[in-house]
Image (tube, rainbow, N blue to C red):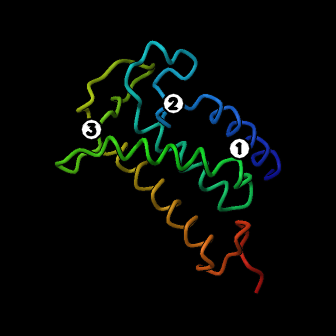
Amino acid sequence: ERPKYVKQLQEMSARIASLQGKDGLWRSGLLDQDNYALPEMSGSALMTYALAWGVNEGILDRKVYRPVIEKAWAGMLHHVYADGRLGCIQQTGAQPTTFKASASYTYGVGGFLLAGSELIKMSEMEHGRMGHSKTGHAAKK
């Protein structure tokens, strides 16, 4: 059933990219962003991770999504505080809600680290490391 999920990732990625905020991040309420002043890091991080993974696997177009990914990463870096905490993470719940910029939870940090790991892979692939070509596909052996 891989083609079904590949198509779903492509469709969802296009929609998510269209909802990206000017600061590169996404809000808790994706379809009602004006009601949420702060970006939400756990969702932004996981979306960045998924987009970067899709590019690295050759499923998403690098030229289209690399700028979205870079903008998101730059936005997330603005929420790593001087004491090393990642802020702007909404607590878990059944619906979007407001939170303080100082809110920090491990699941948001985990998503941030996943996104960073895919960005490292993307960079290594673009520079000819890891046995991958610049197109995002694994080199044939």
Label placed on residue 123: none
Q: Position of residue 69 (x, y in %)?
A: 56, 48
Q: CA distance from mark 1 to mark 2?
A: 23 Å
Q: Residue furthest left?
A: 83
Q: For the point 70% across and 55% down, which residue is it? A: 62
Mark 1 element type: helix
Q: Nearer the viewer, mark 1 or mark 2?
A: 2
Amino acid type, callout 2: Lys
Mark 2 element type: loop
Which numbered disc, 1 or 2, marks the residue that appears first in the sequence?
1
Q: Is residue 59 left or right of residue 50?
A: right
Label placed on residue 104: 3
Q: Quadrant of residue 38?
A: top left
Q: CA distance from mark 3 to mark 2?
A: 22 Å
Circle 2 is placed at which residue position?
22
Q: Quadrant of residue 13?
A: top right
Mark 3 element type: loop
Q: Position of residue 54 (x, y in %)?
A: 66, 54
Would you place residue 16 above or below residue 97 in this image? below
Q: Is residue 107 left or right of residue 66?
A: left
How packed is label 2: few (under 14 Cα within 10 Å), some, or many (20 or more)? Answer: few
Which numbered disc, 1 or 3, marks the residue that appears first in the sequence?
1
Amino acid type, callout 3: Ser
Q: Residue furthest bottom?
A: 141
Q: For the point 23% across and 44% down, which residue is it? A: 81
Amino acid type, callout 1: Leu
Label placed on residue 9: 1
Total numbered circles = 3
Q: CA distance from mark 1 to mark 3?
A: 28 Å
Would you place residue 18 above or below residue 117 in this image? above
How packed is label 1: few (under 14 Cα within 10 Å), some, or many (20 or more)? Answer: some
